[in-house]
Amino acid sequence: MEATTSLLDAAAVGDLVLLDPLTEESLLHTLQERFRHSDIYTYIGNVVISVNPYQSLPIYTPEKVQEYHNCNFFAVKPHIYAIADDAYRSLRDRDRDQCILITGESGAGKTEASKLVMSYVAAVCSKGEEVDKVKEQLLQSNPVLEAFGNAKTIRNDNSSRFGKYMDVEFDFKGEPLGGVISNYLLEKSRIVRHVKGERNFHIFYQLLAGGSAQLLQQLKLHQDCRHYGYLNRESSGLPGMDDAANFRAMQDAMRVIGFSPAEVTALLEVTAVVLKLGNVQLSSSFQASGMEACSIAETQELQEICQLIGLDPSILEQALCSRTVKARDEMVRTTLSVPQGYYGRDALAKNIYSRLFDWLVNRINTSIQVKPGKQRKVMGVLDIYGFEIFQDNGFEQFIINYCNEKLQQIFILMTLKEEQEEYIREGIQWTPVEFFDNSIICNLIENSKCGILAMLDEECLRPGVVNEDTFLTKLNQLFATHKHYESKETQNAQHVMDASLPSQCFRIHHYAGKVTYNVTGFIEKNNDLLFRDLSQAMWASQHALLHSLFPEGDPQKVSLKLPPTASFQFKASVATLMKNLYSKNPNYIRCIKPNETKTAMLFTPELVLAQIRYLGLMENVRVRRAGYAFRQLYDSFLERYKMLSPRTWPRWTGSHREGTEVLLADLAFPPEELAFGHTKIFIRSPRTLFDLERRRQERVAELATLIQKIFRGWRCRTQYQLMRKSQIIISAWFRGHMEKNKYKQMKRSALIIQAYARGWKSRRLLRELKSQCHRHTAATTIAAYWRGYKARRAYRRYFRSGASTRLANFIYRRLVQKFLVGLARNLPPLLVLDRTWPPAPYKFLADANQELRSIFYRWKCKKYREQLTPQRRALLQAKLHASELFKDKKALYSISLQQPFQGEYLGLTQNPKYQKLHAVAKDKLVMADTVRKVNRANGKAVPRLLLLTTEHLVLADPKAAQPKTVLSLGDIHSISVTRFSDGFLALHLKETSTGGAKGDFLLISDHLIELVTRLHQTLMDATAQALPLHITDQYGFSTRFPKGAMAITVVESDKVGSNIPVCKKRGSNKMEVLVH
Ligand SMILES: Nc1ncnc2c1ncn2[C@@H]1O[C@H](COP(=O)(O)OP(=O)(O)O)[C@@H](O)[C@H]1O
Ligand SMILES: [Mg+2]
């Protein structure tokens, strides 16, 4: 209720929409009254009007911030915080990008307002280490930019000399992430010139006042402002502005933003260079050609500059005093006149400073920028230089005012024109409100074909003589009849006498008043030319920052293309800005300046009235009054508020419009508050909307509680059910387990009992059965004996006496039969050498078995013999004979066993030498061999060939192969051999025979056994008489000689190596045969 009364208080109504009656006077009066009560903020709907109090008011305290945080816009006193809160909430909750447009004349309080908005948003959004850092960086960009971009003007001690648009970016929770700052056209002419009573940019004064002695020395600066030409050589301290403190604040701010100490130093060095450039004095001199030239009057300043930037002074001197011009493909160096020299110097200072400022903005941006890829919402805050009308207005004012014109256009478009057009489009009952549309002025300036800026560019780029006069003439021709354009010429044409409009000027009827612009300097400032020599000199410097500011100074990248003009650039950036602003939801703060003298709480009604008029506040109120504060498409409206009616919640199936109607009917708002357009619902007063929003919030809270309740219930229920189910499963398993155990126990016990019982029963049964069995066996035995006895008794008479023998014989026969059959089946192999024979199965068969074995063996031998060849048989017979003769009698026999009897050892048939001998033997040959004959006289042995035929024994000389001695077999009396393993043989002849006359022969044969055997055999065959064979021991035997008998003694010698016996004669009739 209280709020309402304060709003409706006739004298100081908070919302001008409620003003009654609505006249300019009442409006002005209301503002004045409110101002008097220190209520500097007033609404027109949701547009805030702020009247600059020029004194600090206690309405920006943290308590105030809390008061306006999440406030009801219309329930609290109008405040800039309220609109900031509204914008922030709309951004956070409705997901709409916002922009805050702050407009007003220079000094009306725009910059202050923008800072208030920023600080409010920073205060209400959430806190946290990271967020606080971002907020701090965003807020601290202000002191830095203000130091470099603000200056004292006649209208404002802290006037922004550049346009600033700052996009603050938030995440979905409304926490600031960072931002981007765009700057617009710094008024750089201020660097080199400013009118009396104004100042250059703050930074110069701050640096000189706040810099430590050491810093100033390092920068080669004097503390006194009066030393510097660019500071008008006057000390211009400002009351209420502590430059030194501000300098420290600025340095702190830089640190917060993240400037490194090296960057700060570099920045200040470049600043110092600008300041010192103003002190470089030129003096004129004349060249030999008589041409005027300029030179540096006092080189100390120049040298200091060059020391600061690390450049050879001669390069800078040359660049300042001369200029290279391209003439017919040739670079020609021309000297500059003194004014040209100063022009170049100033252009250099301006360029360095404005580029430094751009660098500064970019540097801040790198610190505050948001990493790409994050989803963000944006709140843009525009604080641009205000509308300016000075005594002498130049290019800068023209540009500044053009920008303000564009902002006004946005305001008109968004609040007056578009709104009214929308009502008509939507078919809402509407009486159009008249308003001034400034697009005609915008068009006059910016039309790309025939706007003032286009003409200016054309003049700048046109070859030939170019100066402001031709430019002005052109404008006069083009806009001779334009309503908003005036000049001396057009006035003359219309016969108007106006002393306030000099001939060098043109005047534009801006929305905010008529401004007379002096064209002097337009072309130069628009061209913004810097001699290439100067940019090259800057590029050549060792100072990294300065070097980076002049990339075009690189001689490698010389471009002959003219850089875009200042106005072209500005127009383009303003167009981008406008596009950006149009895409966002606008929130307006319209600043009003109450007096020209910056006096606290002084309200000059005429001044304010003029602003009320040109700001179009009356129209604003009218449209607002007649119109609707809020509109929204039916579908999104229904979507947002459908929970307010049970009929539309949770789902409305009909059309969106019907849904909206039903919903609003349920809420019972007064019908005049609402209007239903074709596609949108319109709500007249913000109060209704706030009411709606409040109800929605309450309902949302309720619904959230409901959802929470149901969710919690569901969660607890499912949790409970899960637990219950688990419990049942667990107990079922547990019980089952218990029962199973119990059952197992019982089963085990039952089994044990059963086992015992069964064991006991079985044992009893066994005992029973055993005793039964015993009884049964006993009974059977008794019965058997008894029956046997009975049977024997009964059959005794029939029993034969020889039955047992017969039975036994039968059994024996059976056994023998079985044995023989078995033997026949299992006869051992027929190999002669195999002596195996199955043993007898029964002892009584042992003899028979032995017999059978020998029979079988003999039979096997017979079989073997039968299959022998006659030769083999003869051989074997011979061998048999040999065994009969020598076995176990002569040691040589066992050695000879292995040697087969070959008979023919000489090869008589093959060797032709023995032809004669062969003839003697013919086919009666039994054996032919080499023997040695022992000479009985000396015991020496000589080789002889021995041939044995069936009739003769022939000895022959081996050389002649002639028979030497031929003995008839019948002549042989006997043979003597030793019992040793030698081949010694004595052939005893019959004394009576023919051969015997020579006496016995003593021979040594390698085949003694065979020889003796064959001799024996042959003799046997021939004479059927056995040949007597003496096998002697060492005692020897005697032989017969023609000279008499000789005793032969066999001596066993241990001489190793030869088995040939050695005969040694001992005495005349004794011979020793050494054998071994
Ligand atoms: N809300 C305010 N409270 C107190 N003083 C203010 C307020 N707004 C502006 N001022 C004063 O007005 C001066 C100019 O304000 P500023 O915002 O710089 O103007 P603009 O940016 O519009 O040119 C400030 O230096 C300050 O002294
Ligand atoms: Mg400002």
Image: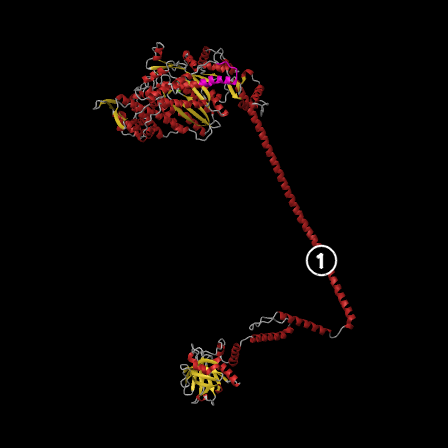
Q: Nearer the viewer, residue 398 or 228?
A: 398
Residue 297 seen in the current view: no
- Quadrant of the rendered image containing residue 332: top left
Residue 938's x, y, as percent? 40, 85
Kindly report the secondary structure that dominates the magenta region of the rendered protein. Answer: helix
**Which residue corresponds to mark 1?**
766
Q: Residue at x 65, y 45 (%)?
A: 742
Residue located 40% across and 28% down the image: 365
Q: Position of residue 72 (x, y in %)?
A: 51, 20
**Left or right position of 926 against 512:** right
Callout 1: SS: helix
Quadrant for the C terminus, please: bottom left
**318 or 716, which lies in front?**
318
Indicate yes or no whether the magenta region holds residue 418: yes
**Residue 971 picture location, percent across and down:** 48, 87
> How far across and how far down the image is residue 84, in percent?
46, 21
Count residues near mark 1 (Cα–Cα under 10 Å), then give few for <14, some for 14-19, many for 20+.
few
User: In this image, 767 relative to 501: left or right?
Assistant: right
Image position of 831 (left or right of 476): right
What amino acid is labelled 1 in the image? Leu
> Which stretch did the figure color magenta?
411-432
Q: Is residue 367 visible?
A: yes
Q: Tell me the quadrant of ligand 2.
A: top left
In the depicted view, which residue is nearer to us: 64 or 1015? 1015
Q: Is residue 730 magenta?
A: no
Instruction: Answer yes or no: disc 1 within 8 Å of ligand 1.
Output: no
| Residue 769, picture quadrant | bottom right
Which color scheme is applied?
secondary structure
